[in-house]
Amino acid sequence: MSSTARSATTPSEEAKSVSFEHAAPQTLAKVNNNAVTLVDPVHKPASYGTFTSRLRRAFGRKDKARSLSDTVEAAISARLGGLATQSPDAVLAALESDWGGLSATAVDAKFKTFGPNALEPDNKLKVPHLLFTALVNPFSVVLVCLAIIAIATGDHATFTVIMVMVVVSASLRFWQDLKSVVKAKRLAQGVKTMVHVRRKNFDMSTETVVESAELVPGDVLELRSGDLIPADCILLKASSLSVSQSMLTGEALPVDKTPYAPDDVEVAKETDSTGDMWAANVLLSGTSVAFGQGLAVVVTTGTKTYFASMGDALTGPRKSNAFERTVRRVSYLLLAVTILMAPIVLVIQGTINKSSGWKNALLFALSVAVGLTPEMLPVVVNANLARGAILLARKNVLVKRLDGVQNLGGITTFCTDKTGTLTIDKVEVHSSLTMQNKESIRPLHLTVVNSTLQTGARSLLDTAVINANDGTHGPEIDMNDLFVEKVHEIPFDSARRMLSVVVKDKRAQHTVITKGAVDEVLSRCKSFTTSDTGSLFETTSAQPLSTAHKAIAKATALSLNTQGLRLVAVAIRSLGQMGEFTEEDRHSDWVEQDLTLVGFVAFLDPPKEDAKQAIVDLRALGIRIKILTGDAPEIARKVAVQVGLLTDEEAAQPETVITGEGLSVLVGELTVEDVTAAVKNATVLAKLSPFQKRQVVELLQADGEAVGMMGDGVNDALALQAADVGISVDTGTEVAKSASEIILLEKSLAAVVEGVLLGRKSMVNTIKYFKMTLSSNFGNVFSVMAASFWLPYQPMQPLQLLIQNILYDLSQSAIPFDNVDEDMLAVPVQWSLMSILRFMLVFGPTSSIFDIATFSLNWFYYGIRGENDAGVAIAQTHWFLEGSMTQTLVVYILRTDKIPFIQSRPSIIFACVVATMLIVAQVLPWIPGLNTAFQFVHPKALIYPFLVGVAVTYCALVQLMKVFYTRIFHEWF
Ligand SMILES: Nc1ncnc2c1ncn2[C@@H]1O[C@H](COP(=O)(O)OP(=O)(O)OP(=O)(O)O)[C@@H](O)[C@H]1O
Ligand SMILES: [Mg+2]
């Protein structure tokens, strides 16, 4: 049988358990409606070309860019395809390398030529790009348009002030972006992708671990399960290598990769028929090893790879979350309001105050428009994120992209794998037992052989087994005494859940040694043995495994699992004396059949000390927690009880635990709503395949949950990528790390709690800015409208409106540093356009009451009523003083739903910045030079007691309204 046919059995088994193929048609339709995007695992895109084009379209690339990239794609394909049809030796020669790898001098020379293997040269900051994004945003565009109108009407002062605003907000943004890019670079350096590479040292070829960035063409890579392919490579040698290309093609199922083998007709046919970068012996950068191992030579690195040519869009999962969508909606709403309001103000000013002329009316309308434009919005939103990321980094939580911060703050359901997160990272062998629960060293000895000889990624279990061979569990076994040699190996994968090696002894006796999950191994056993006396590999004592025996084995496993012990079942098969283990033998699936069960090895996987507290904390934050594991349900249930996720009573209820098989049945029989309800109800989801892990995440998401997923294995990668925020650990597999947005430098749930809190804080501060600024802007427009209908003169000079606006903006730039009340962090942050509008409609007009009081003071007390009245400048100065004061002062009240300063204190920085702006506004009319430039005059002395009165009443009124507001609407931010 050919290799392709062999491993095809694995994917299709996998497919059966996850696809919706048993679902009724209406169920399928609902799945689509709910946008559960389960890529059909058995479907292969007919042509990769069309698929990538589809991807690009999805990412909104222009046609021009597409055709350009298509030529790039063709060139890359031709280069790789050219090498793909040559023998490994020829490929190595073409790349000036050999089986032993490159020498240090060759590496140095090549590094000078080709540069680092990175998507963008490391120290090149894209300054022009940053400048562009800082300058070109809808708000600056509106401002620049307004400035142009100002200069066209000959108003240089207004033009200057508007341009100052543009420059100030752009430079703040630019500086911030620059800072976060530099910071992100520094953080990214903490998350390194390491690769195993063969390099020659004085003609000795050694396997060394280097950073992926140091790779050069010609480097010979050793690839193992969980590795990321770091560059475009040609495969030289492989053993059951399966590669996930989902990053590039969207295909969920891994594909088999085999080296060029002109003798193997089928492989050759396949290689010839593609002869391009999708050939079976080409490994593309950005893909990852699902299972198996291989040896490959690097062909192209860095920006020359296919992955790099696909552009930034593919370098990470980009989903806009609800928060971002609301930010965007509010921004556009504001722009619309501005564009609508300005002409209305213009017409009213122009027709009512005919005397001041249309030009002045235009300038005034301009200033109102400027006042409404939240030019600081991008700055504040970004600054909040950057601040969050920096604080997270101090807690050893690295955020790959800034918006990961708010994604973390937004999660409502947290899914996690079991080992290392809920349990400590150190698994130890507890005992070695026969299937009848009797102590026996044989299962352990066989597992030691298996774990020592296997060459895939060494799992915690393998390490534990090797460490346990120290005499504590019985006599040690010395591999050298066995005189065996490994002739074949079938690596671990999450579909089979077992790992086998085939060994040959001196007399050419071949034996299969399999270890793996209990159900899976048991289903392949035909007999069992409990003998502990004969040779390690003997099967003469084996008896047929009847249904009754199977039941005994299962009962033993169950009782061990319920004690919290992880298990592997161990089985062997004598293949007898045979000749060479042929290529055909290697590729057939008879090896792991007709096994003889020898027993179990039980592992201690104790729960983590801090997990219990972290779970209490996460729950207190309103987050539901689920375990998504590939391990057996009993052990997962036990761990759930140990860490306080389930009480004993809850654990006894059947609906709290769903297994992978159970899930497939549910999916087949129930509607999506019912499946989702069942999944939401369950706390433990066990024996899940990698696809099912993702399926669970997607079902929850379709039901409106924001899902955080934590995991470190190859089997977690799909779910990590699908989740709203993927969390991995520095020690995790490369593929899990690359699929995640957040990397924890220490594997601890407590760090996740911190992360959620900081994420929420950053979101609350953003919402705070929105609500306060919008209500303040709305209040101003409201007052301006009232003034327009009443006063025959402009209530404030356009220039003064702008100054007021700048001062307020500057005061808000300190928002990221403000404190947030604890109770605001206690529930997942959710906000809607509605809640912003409500806030704005209630608190905006409140400030107008005091504006109108100021107008009245000017009108009735000082008798400033005519447009040509000498007192107009005084009236305008008065409103400036009152308006600036109330606008900044109210920030102290609105920033919390509590009693300001007593129950809730602003941060010192924020309080000082706001106070400074407040004072600057008050002294401006007194600063010689500046006051005349901004057309201020000295205010009347009586304005000061008036201002004090306004300040006191306004703050009291807002505080009172706050109480009613929170009572009625049950929300603040
Ligand atoms: N290297 C291995 N060799 C043999 N069997 C293994 C190996 N790794 C895991 N298994 C078996 O597969 C089962 C599932 O483990 P796996 O690590 O795939 O699940 P997981 O979802 O990553 O678990 P967790 O949630 O604890 O991280 C284990 O209990 C064990 O029986
Ligand atoms: Mg795991």
Image: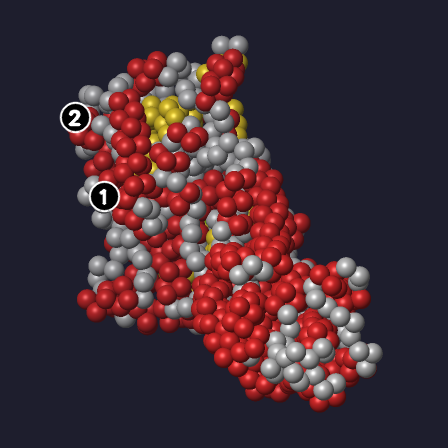
- The quadrant of the picture occupied by the N terminus is top left
Q: Residue at x 39, y 26 (%)?
A: 300
Residue at image point 81% right, 82% down: 942
Image spot of residue 840 (x, y percent) = 55, 77
Give the residue at x 59% y 85%: 790
In this view, the residue in front, 490 or 559, is 490
**Residue placed farthest to the bottom in the image?**
860
> Residue 417 location in percent, x, y?
48, 54
Which x, y percent locates residue 60? 33, 50
Is residue 64 toward the left or the right of residue 295 in the image? left
Q: Earlier in the sequence, mark 1 or mark 2?
A: 1
Type of amino acid at the residue the image marks with label 1: Thr
> Looking at this view, is 286 or 624 the one in front?
286
- Residue 585 lies, in percent from the top left, at 24, 30
**Quarter of the rendering containing residue 891:** bottom right
Asked if residue 185 lies left or right of residue 57, the reply is right
Tell me which amino acid carries mark 2: Val
Q: CA distance from mark 1 to mark 2?
A: 28 Å
Residue marked by disc 2: 265
User: Which residue in the protein does label 1 denote?
Assistant: 50
Res. 736 visible in picture: yes
Q: Residues within 10 Å of mark 1 (few under 14, many from 20)?
A: few
Q: Is residue 174 above or below residue 685?
A: above
Q: Secondary structure at mark 2?
A: helix
| Tag 1 secondary structure | helix
Work out whether 377 lies above or below 209: below
Residue in the image at 33% along x and 46% along y: 61
Which of 334 and 181 lies nearest the eye of the viewer? 334
User: Which label sits in the foreground, 1 or 2?
Assistant: 1
